[in-house]
Image (cartoon, coloured by chain):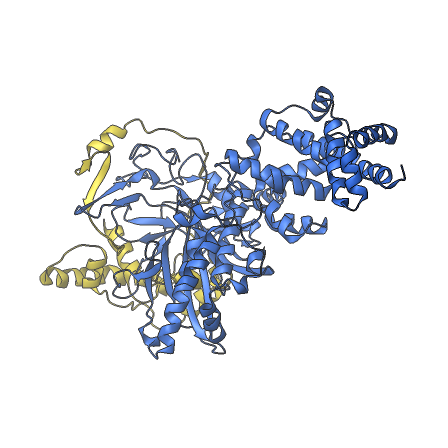
Amino acid sequence: MSTTLLRTIQLNQFSLLGTALIRRRSNNVSVRCCGSQTATTHEAKQTPPSRVAPKNHKSNKLDEILRDYEAVIGIETHVQLSTLTKAFCSCSNNYGSYPNTSICPVCMGLPGALPVLNSKVVEFGVRLGLALNCELSLKSKFDRKQYFYPDLPKGYQISQFDIPIASGGYVDLDIPLEFGGGHRRFGITRVHMEEDAGKSLHSDTEDYSQVDLNRAGVPLLEIVSEPDMRSGVEAAEYACEMQRIARYLGVSNGNMQEGSLRCDVNISIRPIGQAEFGTKVEIKNLNAFSAMSRAIDFEISRQALLYDQGKADQIVTETRLWDEGAQKTVTMRKKEGLADYRYFPEPDLPEVILTQEYVDSIRASLPELPEAKRRRYEAMGLGMQDVLFLANDVSVAEYFDAVIGKGAEVKLAANWIMGDIAAYLKNEKLSINDMKLTTQELAELIAAIKDGTISGKIGKEILFELLAKGGTVKGMIKEKDLVQITDPAEIEKMVIKVVSENQKQLEQYRSGKTKLQGYFAGQVMKMSKGKANPGLLNKILLEKLNAKD
Amino acid sequence: MATRALLAVISASPNRCFISSSRIEIQSSVSSFSSLNFQRHSRKIHRIARSYSSDKDSSVLPPPEVSRLAETARISLTPAEIEECETKIRRVIDWFGQLQQVDVNSVEPAIRADMDGGNLREDSPETFENGDSIRASIPSFEEAYLKVPKILNKE
């Protein structure tokens, strides 16, 4: 139990790197994208993440299980698109509107209303399909998926059943270093367009539920992965990458809390060496990437235990819910038989036809995707920790690219952004786009330190000023007279003065207390208002201290 | 009404149901996991189509299971009504079944039999002016929400 708890803390402390669209809180050390901002007490602890390889922190029990069993995991991701209107009508697509105000006969399923496809949905579908390296179906169609539920006005959902817009792709990603690092490639079975249902609010006390149809008809892209993941860590990182890609492409804000990114997990285990897959269980109600990871770990343990006890037949095909409070999966009421959605082609919508020119023009307009960025940063010589951090948030990556584009040295730029700047943004709860420090000024600051105009320490002070109030590096140097003193003669003068004023310390030094060099250095720094070049200072100081007087 | 009933019937029949005019194989009993196993029709469709357009007497489509149909459509029927419906629905199915006798071996398969595609809309919001009357027509509309019986699971 305690190991599970430790694991929970371990998983929750990862950097909550949000997007430019929401308040960004970043931990300047770890790199898990976790859009999860559930305010649990675990998150509040934020113990400094260790850089030790994960095997030491993973529950030993899980390690043991994974020696005997292999987990086979697939993920279905629903991405809510950030279009201005719904999929099949011109109602506003607005999160947080007053309930049942963004409605019309089409999305309410009123008699006689007919759907008309939003062109942006097709565009986003093509973009995402290309980004996931899929083959696009130049001709695809919509189908009706029929079932009854209060939040489904028409009694069917318009979706794509057998001919989705994209299929047969893959995604490349990197496992965070805290979990062992490494590249992975996971297959993507398909991407298809569909519409969302409304939102139901269930009260525990009352015998009724409430439905808000603002969300009914909002466009979704469903991404179905191949069952290629083998652990909670891999699954969570896959989901993170889906979020990253959605945000990079600008097709969705990918917020799990808002429900604009939803993941359902399909998991089975099998004894290692067995060719057949085990019985598959679906897990829903996962609200954070860390919850995904924990739910998978729990489910692996649950199923393995049943196998060990010879009760493998108690594992049935079912949907289970993740109970965040109890930290376990629980059965939903078991369904009798499989759902029969009675798919048939949507008669009210024509084929979706893509021309090769259209596809090519979209392909040409794709931004540099996370994987390409990561490889490029790696090639620039940055370590994986830096690479994963910088490429995680598209705004941060753009900022970084702009700074080095202006000539700043790569490693220095990375350090500033990941260090002091990230810490500042986290404190002030700002996104990097809201920052007053422009890319131009950061580049100049780095250059000024590099060519010796100012010392590193002064540079840091300037940074804080610029972050808080904006302004220019040149201006600040001038205004506060911060130029570094590199003239040996000048430094020598100060050293001599300090030494002569501190005869007692000088004697102590000469009689063996060599640590007092630091004291002298400090005095010279004070005298020079921090502008003396530290290297030169110490060199001259040493000479003077050790010379025969 | 009849077309709607037919569509419901055909989509609900438990076995594969072929509509030769549009060349689509509809697999009716699919689970929510089926999306992981969908068939790539766009490549293979012509082969599949040809396999059933054979000479054997393919005008016999499976009879409707009316009680199951009624359940999936959430329509309650008395046993007498079920019997009555069975005959009528069966006749409609057989009528469509006649289409299977058409030789379509030389016809290119299509995923849809009609429109040329297109008909896309621009992504610009428009408020429906008469939202009030929609809300007013909802029988159980309370405090901005539709009030519905508490149902926990889909299907």
Is A34 located above or below residue B97 in the figure? above
Q: Is B81 displayed left or right of A511 in the figure?
A: left
Q: Nearer the viewer, residue A337 or A322?
A: A322
Asked whether residue A533 appears in the rendered view, the answer is no
Q: Is B110 displayed left or right of A383 in the figure?
A: left
Question: Within the image, what quadrant is residue A421 found in?
Answer: top right
Query: Residue at position x 40%, y 59% from top?
Result: A295
Where is residue B32? Give x, y as percent.
Answer: 36, 60
Question: Within the image, what quadrant is residue A281 found in?
Answer: bottom left
Where is residue B2? Give x, y as percent.
Answer: 23, 51
Chain B's colour?
Answer: yellow
Q: Nearer the viewer, residue A117 or A325?
A: A325
Where is residue A181? Give x, y as percent.
Answer: 59, 59
- Residue found at the very far top of the displayed protein: A479
Q: Nearer the viewer, residue A296 or A337?
A: A296
Asked whether residue A215 appears in the rendered view, the answer is yes
The quadrant of the picture occupied by the C terminus of chain A is top right
The quadrant of the picture occupied by the N terminus of chain A is bottom left
Question: Within the image, what quadrant is residue B74 found in?
Answer: bottom left
Chain A's colour?
Answer: blue
Is A39 located above or below residue B79 in the figure? above
Number of marks:
0
Where is residue A115? Give x, y as percent.
Answer: 36, 40
